[in-house]
Image (spheres, rainbow, N blue to C red):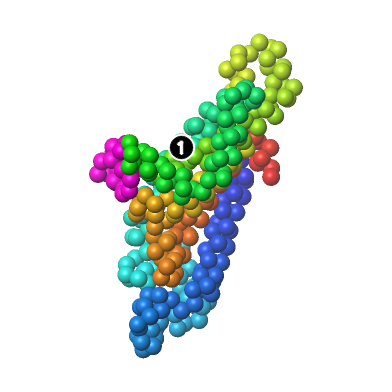
Amino acid sequence: MFRFTIRRLMSGVALLLIVTSATFFLAHLAIGDPTAGLLGNSATPAQRAALHEKLGLDRPLFVQFWDWFSHALRGDFGTSWRNFQPVSDQIALRVPVTLSVVIAATVLAAALGLAVGVATGLRPGGALARVLKLASVVLFALPGFWVSLVLVMLFAVRLQWFPAVGYVPLTQSASGWLSSITLPAVALALSAIVMIAEQLRNGFVEVTKQDYVRTLRARGLSTRRVTLHVLRNASPAALTVLAVMFVGLLGGAIVVEIIFNLPGIGQLTQSASQIGDIPILLGLTAVTVVFVVLVNFLLDLVLGWINPKVRDI
């Protein structure tokens, strides 16, 4: 297990290095000279040249990369080109907002996906299984922003159960925080619930066909104990989908945060992209990749615990 853990950690570090390095060079190639976006079209060539020098863009690209990378290893992502404030401080203010929504959506998706997946797995031909198939088709056909707008119109505008926009920090009010993240979390979680439930149901159906399940029933084990055995062997695919969904939810948070006016990293990503604020984009990329690596690492550990054969891969 120790060697398995070390291998997964090393692969995560390699992924972090590759993605951040590629993002640095691609961002500079795609954005080119960001001074136009930062100063506006009315800026004179002299003003652009002065800002170009101030930002260090007059140096060779590889020198710029090494300067950024060496500081990023110490947690210093530089300063924003827009307001010249530390990137790390700006991201630190935004991360709790996004993580609140994404973690709430993940927990909701895991809980409901598990319940629906087990229920439909035990009765694959039942009415709930047919509803699940219909829901999977409908939710995947509908765009996420449309679902978010429907939730706002129904539960915020018409019923007035939740606020339509805004975010309340947990330190300010626990009830206000929960109320402000409920609709965004539900909007993110709906499609994830269906995917997890589908994977778990399919795993249940396959595992229940195995000979050892019939043996367990023949030995007189209770339905509950048999179901737990089946659940353990049917869960790896659903856990993998859950980890992938977490990563996808981080990306989907951009749209949701714009609709619900949440001051998270999605909103920061949009504003940084519009003006070509590369330090902000690089810092956000690095932080996002760290979350992805951590989630995949935890997933590998759980899968290795469930199925020891995975440790040899």
Task: Examine the rendering and report whether any part of residue 228 can be seen.
Answer: yes
Question: Could you tell me which quadrant the N terminus lies in?
Answer: top right
Q: Which residue lies furthest to the bottom in this view?
A: 46
Q: In this view, does 52 lie to the left or right of 24?
A: left
Q: In this view, does 302 lie to the left or right of 215?
A: left
Nearest the camera: 222 or 175? Answer: 175
Q: Which residue is drawn at 50% across and 35% down?
A: 110
Is residue 180 found inside the magenta-colored segment of the image? yes
Q: Residue furthest left?
A: 172
Q: Residue at x 42, y 61 (%)?
A: 270
Percent x, y of residue 197: 57, 33
Percent x, y of residue 123: 62, 22
Residue type, numbered disc 1: Val
Q: Name the residue under label 1.
A: 107
Q: Which residue is drawn at 42% across and 68% down?
A: 274
Extent of the magenta region: 160-181
Image quadrant of residue 157? top left
Describe the element under mark 1 as helix, strand or loop: helix
Overall secondary structure of the magenta section: loop
Is residue 57 found inside the magenta-colored segment of the image? no
